[in-house]
Image (cartoon, helix red, strand yellow):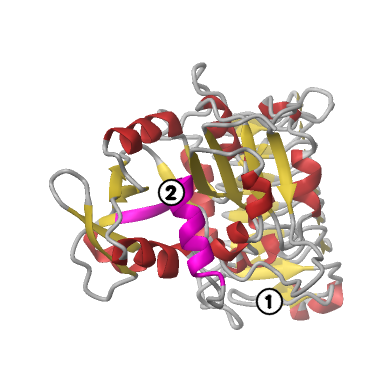
Amino acid sequence: MVKKEMIAMLLAGGQGSRLGVLTEKVAKPAVAFGGKYRIIDFPLSNCINSGIDTVGVLTQYQPLRLNTHIGIGIPWDLDRNEGGVTVLPPYEKSSDSEWYTGTANAIFQNMGYMEQYHPDYVLILSGDHIYKMDYEVMLDFHKANKADVTIATMPVPMEEASRFGIMVPDENGRILKFEEKPEKPSSNLASMGIYIFSWSVLKEALYAKKDQNGCDFGMHILPYCQDKGLRLFAYEYNGYWKDVGTLGSYWEANMELIDIIPEFNLYEEFWKIYTKGDVIPPQYIAADAVVDKTLIGEGAEIYGEVHSSIIGPNVVVGKGSVIRDSIIMKNSSIGEGTVIDKAIIAEDAVVGNYVVLGCGEEAPNVRKPKVYAFGLATVGEGTVIPDRVKIGRNTALSGITVEEDYPGGMLPSGGVIEKDGEEA
């Protein structure tokens, strides 16, 4: 097998439970984003744009959509004889088979995959962030500092710092200490969950901690390296980076794409975002349709009004319908005369005629107030909503719903309807 200077290991096994019904049937990195992409397209595109042509994608939760999307890596030019992209699910071993129990445990279970490339460096990535980063620049920083581990960091507001792993570096960037989600953070430099390890260091640390239950980079591997007196450096990144882990941040990141001058630009020639393109016809916008400040996927048919929204491929918006500040994913259809305000509708959903989705005052969600918040109405994949019902805010729906599920024709704000056995 050919030797590679640096290979990437992309952690894409997470359920993303804070995305509620959006991740009932699909892993978080496979959730649609920006009307055309899936979240995992961003780190994968960063790899190929940074000259990294060997990527292991570690999957676990609901991997089917992700596996189909990645395939043999053609869209990212990762269909290589040597290297390329490889999907790495947990697998049966002759003894002690187990699921991935933590980020570092997942990497450890794929030691054999990494060994075959004899890398000098291993880049560890998360599959669920939206950003553009040249990992080659980070590698240059790693080499220049003769680092054992380099951690990508970015400044965050001090009041949010306790949500992150916090790095405290000296004036040269060498990390003096770090704090995992500290109550009283000593700095505002947060780990982005992107690491470059010199291969021998990673190997030693993973073997040393292999019996640690739920072995994790932030909790176990980095403290181990620090305690050994190894050279850990913070690489400061100041570009756009978004963890789309909540419905609110997911909705915001999508909406930022349609700003007049978007903070995150999908249209830069020199840093393309690649994705698997389906063969579908062009979009169609009817003569009396009204569309403004909206991204529209291929194959979409718009007969109504769409304002400040993201419309995925093959979505149909019926005559007389008005959609505002919403995300509607692939293959969903919206009936006639329907009004949708600040909603996220997952793939293959059917919304009936004369429905009002996202109305009234906000109320906390009765089941998961922290998940279904931000004033959004969230509709799961394959959900069916009957004609002439009204649905409030901070609501969640999944499954094939019928008129009888809406007493008085209404699902009030904060309400939940689940019909397919999955918990919303």
Q: Residue furthest top?
A: 269
Residue at (58, 39) in percent of width and height: 118
Q: Could you say which is closer to the camera, residue 246 or residue 389?
A: 246
28 relative to 1, above or below? below
The residue under label 2 is which amino acid type? Tyr
Describe residue 356's horizontal placement relative to residue 135 as left or right.
Answer: right
Residue 299 highlighted magenta (yes or no): no
Examine the rendering and report whether any part of residue 31 can be seen: no
Describe residue 188's horizontal placement relative to residue 27 as left or right.
Answer: left
Quick one: SS at disc 2?
strand
Residue at (35, 48) in percent of width and height: 148
269 relative to 248, above or below? above
For label 2, the crowd category at 10 Å Cα-Cα, with few meaning under 14, some 14 to 19 and many 20 or more, is: many
The residue under label 1 is which amino acid type? Val
Give percent across and percent down for residue 393: 57, 67
Examine the rendering and report whether any part of residue 54 can be seen: yes
Say which residue label 2 marks.
Answer: 195
Describe residue 373's horizontal placement relative to residue 82 as left or right.
Answer: left
Q: Give the mark toward the camera: 1 or 2.
A: 2
What are the residue bounds of the magenta stretch?
A: 190-210
Residue at (34, 34) in percent of width and height: 143
Give percent across and percent down for residue 222: 38, 62
Image quadrant of residue 22? bottom right
Which quarter of the rendered picture does the C terminus lie within? bottom right
Say which residue label 1 marks.
Answer: 416
Which quarter of the rendered picture does the N terminus lie within? top right
Quick one: SS at disc 1?
strand
